[in-house]
Image: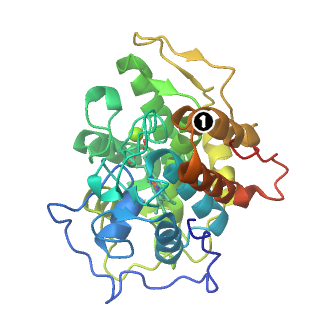
Amino acid sequence: VPESPPGPLNDTSAKLVNDKKHPWKPAGKKDIRGPCPGLNTLASHGWLPRDGVATPAQIVNAVQEGFNMGNDLAVFVTYAAHLVDGNLITNLLSIGGKTDRTGPNPPPPAIVGGLNTHAVFEGDASTTRADFFFGDNHSFNETLFDELTAFSNKFGGGFYNLSVAAEFRFQRIQDSIATNPQFDFISPRYFTAYAESIFPLTFFIDGRDKSLHLDMNVARGFFQNSRFPDGFFRSNTSITLDVIGGGIDYIFSKHPVPPGSNNGTVNSYTPNPNSADFTQFCKLYTDFVNITIRGLYPNAKGALLTALNKNLEYFYSPLVGSGCPQVPPFV
Ligand code: HEM
Ligand code: MG
């Protein structure tokens, strides 16, 4: 049975995280990195195993210690990813591509492909990674970063701030609508796309800095090099689901786009009323369990079923008291 998720930090103050015990080292040939600059950075500083394969508990601890991610957000996101991209029997998840290092595979349609896997968690219109349709959904993309820099100059006085976040989120969506015939922008990706636009502001700015604007050289360090700036202090407050929800509402309000997709040709974006939107947080959770996870494990038995249900319980745990109904265990 997989271990329970770690609890919250006792000390949630800002502190040095690029410290003597966590020096940056470039990823070695066999070290895995992927679409998430947060987890890549934690691995390249040894807050996570440097090889890029970790247990959910290691990930929760690392995002809390290294970035001051709140326990509810850390547990919710980590178990969501583990349930669709990780090996539930060995309790290991790759932060990038599929690897033997996560152990023997369960039967298909389960994928256990790591965070690079398209359309179960990773999705389109990312900030600095291209859409899956164009061939590489996980590597740093200089063209996109240059575009982000241009937006930071135009809307943020040379910095990434909330205005830039809102404008660039909309730009990435418009770009995918116009160029990616397979553009897919429904829940859960709909939620994570807006969340990832907030993350650089809550996590990549030094915890002693109150400005809410991010230097673009610091941004490049995280996005491209998986590296903390010298002397970097984590956030001075735990970043909870509510904090991110507030940021999402702000960005959405600037350029509302409903969940939807292109239907095989460019410029054919069609809203999908079956997808959860930002008024339906519980539906994000219930559809993720009933559709996304169930689709990968339609018929789990024995130890796999036990592990699946344990991880589903952990995934729900931040929502206890939220008013969202818990999906019953799989049978
Ligand atoms: C993107 C997973 C924590 C910052 C992503 C993506 C995944 C992911 C799968 C790719 C989504 C996409 O763009 O298609 C996770 C998991 C976490 C976690 C499982 C565990 C808690 C964090 C933390 C930070 C962070 C702590 C910041 C310190 C970002 C950013 C992106 C991203 C900024 C957008 C990258 C880009 O497109 O340029 N994450 N993440 N994540 N994540 Fe994480
Ligand atoms: Mg993506």
Measured from the top left, where is residue 102 in percent x and y?
Answer: 35, 57
- What residue is disc 1 on? 294
Residue 80 seen anywhere in this rendered image of the structure:
no
Which quadrant, please, contains the N terminus?
A: bottom right
Give the colour scheme of this rendering.
rainbow
Query: Is residue 117 toward the left or the right of residue 321 in the image?
Result: left
Q: What is the total number of numbered labels drawn onto the structure image? A: 1
User: Is 169 above or below relative to 92?
Assistant: above
Measured from the top left, where is residue 184 in percent x and y?
Answer: 48, 25
Measured from the top left, where is residue 134 in percent x and y?
Answer: 28, 28
Measured from the top left, where is residue 293 in percent x and y?
Answer: 57, 39
Residue 230 seen anywhere in this rendered image of the structure:
yes
Q: Quadrant of ligand 2?
A: top left
Q: Residue at coordinates 41% horizontally, 39% vertically from top-left? A: 111
Which quadrant, please, contains the C terminus?
A: top right
**Label 1 lies in ligand 1 vicinity (Cβ under 8 Å):** no
Q: Nearer the viewer, residue 145 or 196?
A: 196
Q: Nearer the viewer, residue 181 or 14?
A: 181
| Location of residue 219 by image quarter | bottom left
Q: Nearer the viewer, residue 210 or 51?
A: 51
Query: Is residue 157 toward the left or the right of residue 141 in the image?
Result: right
Q: Check the image and name the residue furthest to the left.
A: 29
User: Is 295 above or below relative to 152?
Assistant: above
Q: Residue at coordinates 38% horizontally, 54% vertically from top-left? A: 158
Q: Nearer the viewer, residue 159 or 9?
A: 9
Q: Which amino acid type is shown beneath numbered disc 1?
A: Arg
Callout 1: 10 Å neighbours few (<14), some, many (20+)? some
| Secondary structure at numbered mark 1 | helix
